[in-house]
Image: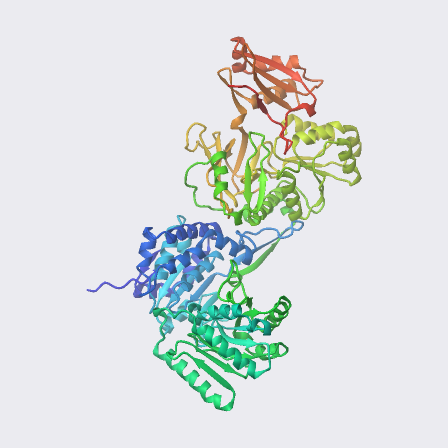
Amino acid sequence: MTESVQHHYWQGAFVDDEEAGRRLAGLSATVEAALAEPLDTETVLAACEQLAAALRDPAHPTHVRLAEHLAEGEDTTVLTELAAFLSRAELTTKLRRELGGTSPQRLNRPDAKETVYEAWAPVGLVAHIAPGNAATVAPLSLVEGLLAGNVNVLKTSSADTLLAQHLLAELAALDPTGAIAERVIVLRFSSSRQDWLRMMCAPADAVAVWGGESAVEGVAAHVPPGCRLVEWGHKISFAYLTRDAWQDPAALAALATDVCLHEQQACSSPQVVYLDTEDHDEVFAFAERFAAVLGGMPPAERDTATGPAEEAELTTTELIARLEEHLDLTRVIAAPDGSWRVMADIRPALTASPLHRSVWVKPLPRKNLLGTLRPMRRYLQTAGIAGGRTDIAELSRLALAAGATRVTPLGRMLGGYSGEPHDGVYALQRYSRRVAVQADERFATTACLDDLTRQVSFPPPAGPLLDKAAVQKLNDAVDPRDAELYFRSGGSTGKPALSLFTYDDYDTQMRAAARGLLAAGYDPARDRTANLFFCGGMYGGFISFFSILERLGGTQMPMAAGPDHRVTAEMLVTHEVDTLFGMPSYLWQLLHDQADLLRSYGGIRKIFYGGEHFTAEQRRVLTEDFGIETVRSITYGSTDLGPLGYQCTESTGGVHHLHADLHTMEILHTDADRPVEPGETGRLVFSTHARRGQNLGRYVIGDLGRALPGPCPCGNTSPRFELLGRGGDVMRVASYFLNYRRFVAIAEQDRGYRGELQVLLARTEAREQLTVRVEATDTAGPKELRAAFLAGYEELRSAVDDRLLDLVVETADGADFARTATSGKLRAVVDDRQG
């Protein structure tokens, strides 16, 4: 008994004709089951990037397996072309251009002042009818359907190899969630099997068909009412030259390149050359000159040889043109071996070429361009225009008005750019629906509606752990095209580090931070905000929060942190500011230095802080003494990773939600690279997924924290964690490990201290010295604080009792505390020990 051939791929398995036919009968139910769970765009991007890497490596097993399915005579450059399209950089650019971002299906607020949510939703099922003998079109069309979140059924020609089936099977295998496999069906059958074509299209929400008019008509008969028919049909392209251009040898060489590349088989290949003239003699003279250039081009590759039908069309077209020479309508110049032909024709009407280096040359003065070409607007695609700068501007407008969808220089008609629309439309929008949800005031602090129902799912992070030094080394490998924006860190924990961003990545991060600020209770419709972060020296604080407020549409006074507190306070009063953005240490100094003015003003209602923390006692003072209603973290993040977490209205202290649409988070033991038990404290490790320029995976940021169990009262399903200090807060002093935060906690809880606190480490001739620097207050003097530290910190007391350490507590003015130059952050620990 002969084993049946399994040349159909159906949701993760290869099946034969009998099984494929049985499953086709139940396609509608299959689609409904697959659509029950949304497909995260990151799942598709991650799998595509892995597949692209495999296709670029000729020795990779995936590359070797797929090469076996190339058509006879086809080389592996096809796999290289596929790799270029499937790269993360290419696909993220495509998503941003066509759907506005890399997470287009999430219901976000396009206007932060309104509780209206919009997203791009999949249409549902997309049926792709691929052309024969176009190895890359079929799988890439399906990948576009996946990027839009759809279930996809793809028909390939019965004459094609199984490249599309096996390529998409490899892609699905790279997705550990199985979500891609659920959305991929690839069938190989002849168009004569009308019953299969009908079953394939019947439940479809969009049908994408590649081919000429007859192919489209054959499929359209099976498209149900209300289903979107997406036609990717054959198109005609032309060149247009002004007088100066057609006399330029370089322009003619570029035009010949466009004609010969791919032997005019691409829709963007020029079939007609128009000259901006009414003089027939000029047309014939140009044809002679261009024929000489075309005849000097390298011969066609052997695998592009014409078949009998194509030879017949070439012969017929040339013969008719030669016959019309007797009527003074045409002139034909052709190669003796028939490898190319230039056919001059004084009639301007657009005429399709028989291709294979066959070109019409016609007169068309620009005043007649629109009237001549517009009747053929359904078929026009690329116009390659050559002329002066003003000519190009004018002729481009005319060509587009006539129906062309692309205008390029000569020599680049078959080229393109990342994210370019195809035939005048964006494919991803054709495979998507724009949807909206209107909500009431209960959703004022909900920035993304999806956060209330499900967490974003990312593939688990893999690879080695990275520290700051390793991340800095990655900067050396960043493509200069991806280094558009440079920031330096504040340097609060060491030497300032450099971080590089693309503007697209920066925009993604600022929009995420803006959503986090809404969750924290910021109201862009009512709050009047002073941006008081530090600025300059390539530090990103002020600039970032300017960008965040810009995206929120919030009212902003971009003051920046200044040394003259009186001037700043007067500006707050003059401009009726009620919300402050800034560093805790700066805001604390400002409020206390100008306490009389600001208390009498009484208009400050909200403080959103970043970069440092207010203690519980400081927050109490701000609330009770200054009447401030909201004191909340503006964001938790770093210069290199961007925003990592945000607070909601139910969060206090160091509790934050993870920006789960940007990052995944691990919590590892402090002394081993393994996860802690749930609820235990460990090192926070982040992997970011929304960066084009850098792959920042498993970055050990230097902070400590723990995961918080259970749902948040705010309803947000994003993971929660609590910050518990930095690894650098732990100091090895006199053979003991001491924690800066223990000093803060003892001062606050035992003595009611509410100011700033700084630890200075030095080495004297006799022993080490630890100095605790505090602000002068009525509640806690140096003597009382020293006694509290010794009483409440056993390890500290032992070090002092054993005469290994001198403990000093001193008071200082807030302006004298050591701070970083760029960000103004308080340096918690200043270690001046040598050796």
Using the image, determine if residue 287 lies above or below residue 457: below
Q: Give the left or right position of residue 639, taking residue 335 as reference.
A: right
Q: Residue furthest left?
A: 1
714 over 330 or under it: above or below: above
* Quadrant showing the N terminus: bottom left
Q: Is residue 576 above or below residue 36?
A: above
Q: Nearer the viewer, residue 93 or 722?
A: 93
Q: Viewed as shown, does residue 791 lie left or right of 522? A: left
Q: Position of residue 762 (x, y in %)?
A: 57, 17
Q: Who is closer to the viewer here, 231 or 105?
A: 231
- Pick whichever, 103 or 450, lies toward us: 103
Measuring 76% from the left and 29% from the top, which residue is drawn there? Answer: 594
Looking at the rendered structure, the number of numbered marks drawn on it comes to 0
Give the colouring mode of the picture.
Answer: rainbow
Where is residue 299? Give x, y as percent: 38, 70
Q: Position of residue 748 (x, y in %)?
A: 63, 21
Residue 285: x, y in percent? 53, 80
> Which of 6 and 709 lies nearest the eye of the viewer?
6
Q: Specify the quadrant of the image occupied by residue 369.
A: bottom right
Q: Is any part of residue 284 visible from this angle?
A: yes
